[in-house]
Image (cartoon, rainbow, N blue to C red):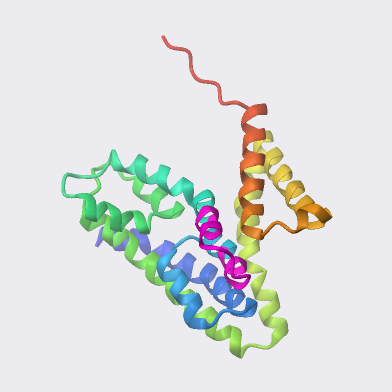
Amino acid sequence: MKGLRHGLAIGLGYLSVSFAFGMKAVADGLTPLEAVLISMTNLTSAGQVAAVPLIIAQSSLLEMALTQLMINLRYALMSISLSQKMGDDMNTPRRMLFAFVNTDEVFAVAASQPEKLEHSYLYGLITLPFVGWVMGTLLGAVAGQLLPEFVRTALTFAIYGMFMAIILPPARKEKSVCLVVVLAVMLSCCFRYIPFLSGISGGFVIILCAVAAAGIGAWLFPVKEDAAP
């Protein structure tokens, strides 16, 4: 029950965000069923938003896989971090199931727990976020077919607002984050408007911009290790 209580707020938050995703996916050309299946099998907002135009453009499976790998690599690091706190009952199958719904918010709540993380708590923690994400997608996809066009257009910007809310606070505090964001935007514009670059598909543009911006940021702002005592 503790896990369910802790996951309730996350699930309610995901309901609104995935509602916007469902509307956008249908507006871009997917069916409601396809939108829901994406949310059921790939629980990651940024990855799903990036995947929709690739699916519409019938990009290769390799391109889609590499795009998801770049966007979602942080989840592997989160899972490795949490593995140090898991109880003895978390065997490999149970770890794999939890990793499937180990989102940013789930990780933050789980990592803040002082005690060992047993499977009963972790399964409770991920249940409502998963249900909220899938149900929000379904509601948004259905609403996208019923609401007037001007309302659909306005609501589809909500998911981009979420990304802005995530990016802007750390960008205002950290010069390095701000630089990486600006570089990624500039590179994306280059791939959009420069003729010989505009032919590169969207998935590889995401990969190239992410790697280049992060690499330049790491070179200009290396993390200094503490000196050994």
* Residue 154 drawn in magenta: no
Q: Quadrant of the C terminus?
A: top left
Camera-side residue of 45 and 14: 45
Quadrant (top left/top right/bottom left/bottom right) for the N terminus: bottom left
Q: Residue at x 57, y 70 (%)?
A: 55
Q: Which of 87 and 92 lies nearest the eye of the viewer?
A: 92
**Measuring 43% from the left and 55% from the top, which residue is drawn there?**
103
Q: Residue 150 placed where, x, y %?
A: 73, 82
Which of the 4 image quadrants contains residue 84?
A: top left
- Rendered view: 48 above or below 80: below
Place of residue 199 in the rendered image (x, y in percent of width and height, measured from the top left): 74, 59
In screen coordinates, is 222 left or right of 185?
left
Q: Is residue 158 left or right of residue 16?
A: right
Numbered marks: total:
0
Magenta stretch: give its range. Answer: 51-67
Residue 114 on image: x %, y % = 29, 41
In the image, 80 versus 171, the foreground residue is 80
Please give the name of the residue rendered at 66% of the width and 40% of the height, measured from the top-left corner.
Answer: 212
Q: Main secondary structure of the magenta part?
A: helix
Query: Based on the displayed image, in which of its 4 quarters is residue 28 positioned?
Result: bottom right
Residue 156: x and y, percent? 65, 73
Is 46 left, or right, of 199 in this rendering? left
Q: Is residue 66 magenta?
A: yes
